[in-house]
Image: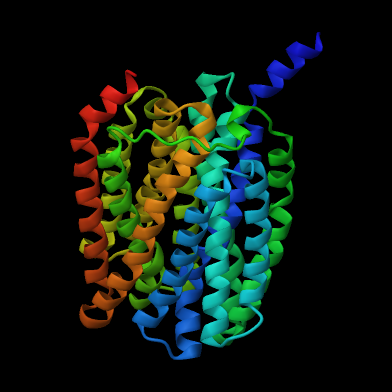
Amino acid sequence: MSSNATIIRSNLSLLPAFGLGLGVAVSVGLARFAYALLLPAMRESLNWNYVAAGSLNTANALGYIVGAVSAYFLLRKIRPSQLFITGLLLTIVAVLATGLRSDLLWLTSTRLLAGIGAAWVFACGGALVAARYHAHQTLRRVATGLFFAGAGIGIAVSGLVVNPIIAALGNPAWPTAWLALGVVAAIASIWPIMEASRIAGEANAVSSGALNLRGLMPSMLAYFLFACGYIVYMTFIFAWIQAQGLSWKFGTAAWFVLGSGVAVSPFIWRRALDTWNPAVILAASCFVTLLGALLPAFFASAPSIILSTALFGSGMFIAPSSVAVLVHRALESNQWAKGITLFTVVFSFGQAIGPIGAGWIADSAGLTRSLYFGAALLAVASGLALIGLRRVSERMQD
């Protein structure tokens, strides 16, 4: 067998996408969403109300804004792979540091830094996957979905790490849980760093050209509202489960189902990612997460919560996958990283707004009403994505 044939066969494997996806597992699953598991313990130990708890998540989201905006400009000078690796290292340091002190300023700073690192990983990783599978378009879209679905692994693992620690040692052990998450993050980052270091090509090059956003604004606005809505569920669902008097073991099971739903979502949605218009994929993913968010609000039972987390997980990271597919089809390859980064900027603003609004609603009217608030945002996002369908279709024909 020739060396060229060997390279082609190796390129057909989805393992590189899985390896890069562990970067999302670290930056999103462990560094961001694990906070939902630790929120009740930290709130109890530190005497926070829901607004204070939500504001700490907003600090993470503000860091995500800083990371996304800075990435847009840094990519003019730095290759996506370099920024991806830097973001992973920053995230590891931030997660470990969160377990070292308990004062609000320190925690706000570490959550801010974790957000910056996560944005660099999230924005650049989608372009790196596309660069890795540039010659294999039949695999590129499912590989993109697999990359973002790496968050599901991080979500599931975070539940297995955090909940037993809190259950065994009590709420004051939340710093120990953060330190444990940091160790897991460091180990999990080895493979994605190795994969990113191997990627070359035009999609992993600096880009200084202006982006042509004609026809993409409705999708961008829908993505903004999706970010506002989904983060409400992810911030407060575990606290809501505990408020129903359900055990930490059940909460761990529900969290594991959520992460598993994210992990298998690219295979559930594979045909859609291959054949549907990206605007339709975005609308459908918003609608599925909407259903998942409404179930526990209407049916407060253990089976409905499990179904809720499964539905929500299966749709949650298909939204960024649809955006990545849209960027791949609408822009030149040397602008993929900048295009995904711009959508990430919009997404990051949505994530910053959602927890504060939902926290205010939770304090004044209860956690269930905050779930309604998030679901309403997801409903509007789904409609907006469909409104932009014709414009996206025209853009795809360019």
Q: Decide if residue 303 is in sight here.
A: no
- Quarter holding the N terminus? top right
Badge count:
0
Task: Work out whether 16 lies above or below 250.
Answer: above
Residue that appears at 62% across and 34% down: 204
| Residue 8 horizontal/vertical position (percent) | 69, 16
Q: Decide if residue 61 is in sight here.
A: yes
Farthest bottom residue? 47
State the image quarter where residue 52 is shown.
Answer: bottom left
Task: Work out whether 43 lies above or below 123.
Answer: below
On the picture, is 199 further left or further right than 171?
right
On the picture, is 266 further left or further right than 244?
right
The answer to which of 310 and 99 lies nearer the viewer is 99
State the image quarter where residue 81 is shown.
Answer: top right
| Residue 59 horizontal/vertical position (percent) | 46, 71
The answer to which of 353 and 310 lies nearer the viewer is 353
| Residue 57 horizontal/vertical position (percent) | 44, 70
Look at the image and name its color scheme.
Answer: rainbow
Residue that appears at 44% across and 54% down: 258
On the picture, is 98 further left or further right than 252?
right
| Residue 26 horizontal/vertical position (percent) | 61, 56
State the image quarter where residue 218 is shown.
Answer: top left
Task: Work out whether 375 lies above or below 221.
Answer: below
Farthest top residue? 1
- Quarter holding the C terminus? top left
